Image (spheres, rainbow, N blue to C red):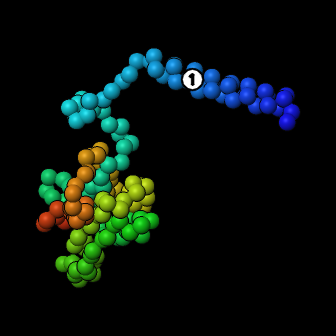
């Protein structure tokens, strides 16, 4: 066995160990910052870009912007969204698609935001809610449209 190779490997190992110890000691003496969650909920700052839960905003008249086109459902890579619609006849005799139920499975959502990007009417958006832990998975399937809600009239 070659002694130069042996000692070279030994010194490389010691240099690597020294680098690790230097990093450890530097972190050991830095000031620690601990967030006391859940006691600090009131002053907790969540970034505006955070994607927590998909929501369907409604106005004061219980109206939303969803026209049940299904683009969000098609854009979802794992079938998290299910848009249930029906065809209704309007006063002027035309047939129109109407939203019956907008189901969202929070448990299988990967928060990719492809659904919100695909929506042409900005009918859905991600909120900053992050406390979504439940003991029963069936509680993660949410209906986003409120009972008795309808599509908002177009602004002219």
Residue 60 percent location from the top left of the image? 14, 52
Residue 106, picture quadrant: bottom left
Tell me the residue at 85%/28% (across/down): 4
Bin the neighbour count of mark 1 within 10 Å (Cα to Cα): few under 14, some 14-19, many 20 and up. Answer: few
* Total labels drawn: 1
Q: Is residue 82 left or right of residue 14?
A: left
Q: Above or below — where is 1 with respect to 131?
A: above
Q: Is residue 19 left or right of residue 59?
A: right
Residue 37 percent location from the top left of the image? 25, 34
Residue 151, picture quadrant: bottom left
Q: Is residue 125 visible?
A: yes
Residue 63, picture quadrant: bottom left
Tell me the residue at 33%/27% (across/down): 34
Tell me the residue at 85%/36% (across/down): 1
Q: Above or below — where is 16 with respect to 154?
A: above
Residue 8 percent location from the top left of the image? 79, 28
The quadrant of the rendering that contains the C terminus is bottom left
Foreground residue among 106 and 137: 137
Residue 101 percent location from the top left of the image? 23, 70
Q: Above or below — where is 104 with respect to 1?
A: below
Foreground residue among 117 and 113: 113
Under circle 1, the secondary element is: helix
Q: Above or below — where is 89 with respect to 127?
A: below
Q: Is residue 80 left or right of residue 22?
A: left
Q: Is residue 150 left or right of residue 1?
A: left
Tell me the residue at 36%/24% (across/down): 33
Disc 1: which residue: 21
Q: Is residue 144 visible?
A: no
């Amino acid at each position: 066995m070659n002694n130069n190779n042996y000692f070279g490997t030994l010194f490389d190992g010691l240099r690597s160990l020294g680098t690790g110890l230097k990093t450890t000691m530097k972190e050991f003496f830095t000031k620690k910052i601990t967030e006391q969650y859940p006691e600090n909920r009131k002053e907790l700052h969540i970034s505006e870009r955070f994607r927590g839960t998909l929501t369907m905003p409604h106005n004061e008249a219980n109206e939303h912007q969803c026209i049940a086109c299904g683009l969000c459902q098609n854009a979802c890579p794992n079938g998290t969204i299910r848009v249930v619609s029906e065809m209704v006849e309007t006063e002027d005799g035309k047939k129109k698609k109407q939203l019956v139920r907008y189901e969202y499975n929070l448990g299988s959502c990967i928060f990719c935001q492809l659904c919100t990007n695909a929506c042409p009417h900005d009918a859905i958006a991600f909120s900053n809610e992050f406390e979504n832990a439940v003991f029963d998975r069936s509680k993660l399937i949410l209906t986003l449209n409120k009972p008795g809600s309808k599509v908002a009239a177009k602004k002219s």
